[in-house]
Amino acid sequence: MQDFRHVFIILLSIAEAVLLSVYFKSDVITLVIERDLFILIIIFVNSILIYLLFSSIVMSIVYYFSLYIIFIFININLLSITYFLSYIIGVSFALFGYFFINRSFNDNFILNLRNFKPRINTFSIILSVIFVIIVSLFVKNPLILIGSILNLLILSISGEIVLSPLTLASWLATPYLLSQLGEIRVNKGLCIGKINGILRRSTFELGRVKTNAKYKWANIKSDFCIDLDNSKNYNMIILGTSGSGKSSLAKTIVSKLNVSYLIFDIHGEYFTEAKRIDASLISVNPLSLFGQSPRQRALEVAYMLKSIFNLGNLQVIDLFNIIFETYEEKGIYEEDSSSWNNTPPNFRDVILLLERKKRYINNSTELNKIQSLEPYLNFVSNSMFNTNSINYNDIFEDNYILDLSKITIPEIKYIVIETILRSLTSFMYSTGTSKLRKMIVIDEAPFILSKESGQLLVERLFAEGRKFGIGFILISQTSEYVKKLISNSAYLFALNLVEPADLDYVSKIISGPDQDIYKSIYDSLHKLDRGLIITRNILQDEIFLVRIQQ
């Protein structure tokens, strides 16, 4: 059995049955306590104990009934009105206490049962039938046979072959088998850690992550796996403070995926078996068309420079015009798509055209407009942006880490990243639709998302990536710049957070409208140890506390 709680209750039930059997068959009538009261106390204690263990009034009632049948089997005359009323009183007390405390019906067993999907397994049914036959041959008691038949019916829709022998246990195993119909199992797909807890309504706490709210992290034993095949897309967002385990989680995911990956390593922190590229030693040409028309590409580059240097709208227009004209000087025309394969210009070509235009301008206003662009074009006209020294298709087909830590100028680092991401759009469109084939990891995502052009680009890739088999893992220490992308992500993994604004936002996203859940998550997030994550599994609508596999 996978859950110690069931084992404990079953052993307790057997012990109580034996105790009552001896007690009722004894010739010595105890003077300490009356028999009726003795039965009532046992049921009363069980009602409290089972509810505390399972946080489920339904499971408590199921166990009461099973225990009641067991008592009948050992020839205790519980069918008498006195003992039957004792049973009803115990159940009624538990129901009253439940609704008095919770003011609503939020039963764990019912919540879990929402996830149950019937599975018919012929072999499991055949095994269970054999065990029922064995019970009918060796145990001449119709009550026990009814329990075994009920177990057979449960197993026939659960498809759990390994549980078939429990048919022999009759009513002792019935509650456990019922609980397995809604048991949380997140062990299909890409397993990245172990579940430490699932958020459940209660007043108790688990381990080092504690909460004063009405929910607790109830202990369950299962792997935590992400099912990308059945997710709405392949995108993931990882949030957490420095040192909380964000990079470890990203490395765990990409190392287990059976697809290639590209990691934009801002600080030189990633070391895997992937090929490593020192970005300070390569060159990329931002004016490469990447399958776009020269007009479209000129506009994208102009907006990239606007985002980097905070240029005005008029300067963007002037940049667009001069870049677009440079394409034409290189024989690349908007109306002639065959010319788009010609060698593209670079920023030095743009500056040369700018210098030539200055010679023919007599209007001081026009001259000032052009001269205002020179500092920015001179800045980006270094050797790093003259040509493409890397094969874009190669880095998208194989495992690569792009180490940007040795580029000390943020603006240059940004241009390298955006240029490569722009080339990714060409790769997607040219290779067509596909299942997941490439995972892109962007560490320190705000570095890109804080720029307008970067945010628009990543939003586009997030929206279109699944169709072309591209997934993204964005890593950030803050939620500020990723808010627009969370709705288009399959998974949000929250590690330790301390900033009140981040705690508030992430807790609301994970909890939904329930304020009690919100309080529990808010209280837990800033106490998480390194390697612990809180996430909501959208497919099962459950909130998990997970320990990352290192």
Image (tube, helix red, strand yellow):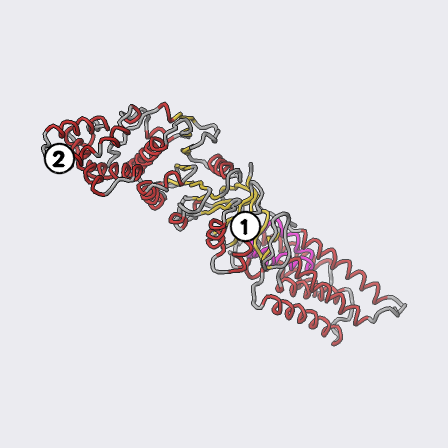
The answer, for residue 400, to whether it is visible in the render is: no
Q: Which residue is mark 1?
A: 544
Which residue sits at x=28%, y=25%? 382
Q: Which dot, 1 or 2, sits closer to the camera?
A: 2
The answer to whether residue 161 is magenta is yes
Please say if 175 is above or below 393.
below
Q: Is residue 1 visible?
A: yes
Drawn side of residue 371 relative to residue 211, left or right: left
Magenta stretch? 154-182
Q: Is residue 359 magenta?
A: no
- Most foreground residue, 362 or 124: 362
Residue 267: numbered disc: none
Quarter where residue 281 is shown? top left
Q: Amino acid at mark 1?
A: Phe
**Residue farthest to the front?**
364
**Percent x, y for residue 412?**
33, 30
Q: Earlier in the sequence, mark 1 or mark 2?
A: 2
The kind of secondary structure element at disc 1 is strand
Q: Which mark is residue 364?
A: 2
The 10 Å Cα crowd at callout 2, few under 14, some 14 to 19, many 20 or more, is few
Point out residue 40 in the picture as x, y percentages from the top left corner. Answer: 75, 69
Secondary structure of the magenta portion, mostly?
helix
The Cα–Cα distance between marks 1 and 2, rounded to whole angstroms, is: 66 Å
Residue 38, quarter of picture: bottom right
Which type of secondary structure does the marked residue at label 2 adopt? helix
Q: Position of residue 39 (x, y in %)?
A: 77, 68
Query: Residue type at mark 2?
Result: Ser
Mark 1: few, some, or many residues within 10 Å (few <14, many ≥20)? many
Q: Viewed as shown, does residue 472 lie left or right of 524?
A: left
Above or below, 47 against 418 in this view is: below
Query: Residue placed farthest to the bottom in the image?
Result: 81
